[in-house]
Amino acid sequence: MENQERKKRIFSGIQPSGELTLGSYMGAIKNWVALQDEYECFYCIVDMHAITVRQNPAELRRRALEQLAQYLACGLDPEKCVLFIQSHAPQHAELGWILGCYTQFGELSRMTQFKQKAQQHQENITAGLFTYPVLMTADILLYQSDLVPVGEDQRQHVELCRDIAQRFNGVYGPTFTLPEAFIPRTEQGARVMSLGNPENKMSKSDPDGCVYLMDKPEDIRRKFKRAVTDSETAVRYDKENKPGVSNLLTIYCAVTGKTMAEAEAEFAGQGYGVFKPAVGEAVIELLRPIREEAGRLMGDKAYLEGIYREGARRAQLVAGKTLSKVQRKVGFIAR
Ligand code: TYM
């Protein structure tokens, strides 16, 4: 009964392993804000995922709180969605363990993000890094999520989540809603690329190629001025031959709401010397109110604490129900 009447659900999260970036904003948060009226949304700060690579404890704590302030500053409304910290809902770890027993070693070995991260952290390839997609699966399934708004790089993980859910449902009968990835549709395929190396995705671990939501206008201006383009002069979308310019055009369109044709027409006959700073200014105007509001919120720790405490309470209510059901199905004695 409850399942038929309730609003459709959304779960998504971002790791506080670095500062929020324009990539996470355009790939995920922008959609989170757009979907919060229509769906019942759970938006999480996934600190348990962040420790799959070594973190500085004081920085991790600071970034988790800043991330909450930035979620709010981006327009997420705690009246409409549940904002919480992953480690505050112990059901994530508990379901993660159970689901790990329904996941194949081979499946996890095929995850491209694991392969990349294992390359980057060769001195510390932990079991947590390997089983990370199982924890992500638990995150999503605990809330019986219908949609998971993420960037393109997370598609494979959401597909694995579906496979695990389907397998579990096959053995024990309908238990989990099968989620779908919700990925922004842009010319570029929902991937914001690095400004310094447009063949790679914009990532928080690459300060020069990356715009952080909290960057000051002068930093943003400098990063766009230095953005890598090509030896032509035409501002034209051509992902294969002009990856840098195409990335800048994609950012410009996402930020201003213009179509690609409108953007190309606007810069027709103008060189990169005009184009690159114009994209920078558009991004500065997008981020200015977000930076200011997040800064203000960081001055009110009591308010932020109220939000994440209430978020944890509401998250646990839903997560607890799913976990009990799963524990019963696999044969645990009720507590
Ligand atoms: P994370 O923290 O790496 O990234 C957060 C979100 O931002 C998107 N994103 C991008 N989108 C487009 N272009 C980019 N350059 C870019 N960089 C980041 C990511 O696709 C993601 O949506 N495993 C997840 C976190 C997670 C999660 C979950 C997500 C944990 N549990 C459950 C959804 C549901 C991650 O590492 O995202």
Image (cartoon, rainbow, N blue to C red):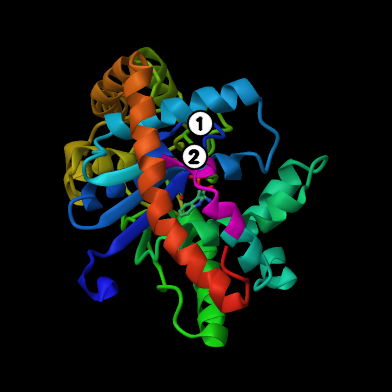
Quarter holding the N terminus is bottom left
Report the side of 183 relative to 162 (left or right): left
Q: Residues within 10 Å of mark 1 (few under 14, many from 20)?
A: many
Q: Position of residue 116 (x, y in %)?
A: 67, 50
Distance CA(mark 2)–CA(mark 1)? 6 Å
Residue 112 % position (x, y): 63, 59
Tell me if residue 104 comes above or below residue 120 in the rendering. Answer: below
Looking at the picture, which amino acid does disc 1 mark?
A: Gly
Picture coordinates of residue 10 (x, y %)?
A: 34, 58
| Residue 306 highlighted magenta (yes or no) | no
Per the image, label 1 sits on a secondary structure element best described as loop
Do residues under tags 2 and 1 come within 8 Å of each other at their CB atoms? yes
Which mark sits nearer the N-terminus, 2 or 1?
2
- Residue shown at 72%/42% (left/top)? 120
Residue range in magenta is 84-94
Q: Amino acid at mark 2?
A: Met
Which corner quadrant holds the C terminus?
bottom right
> From what the image shows, is residue 243 above or below residue 308?
below
User: What residue is disc 1 on?
Assistant: 209
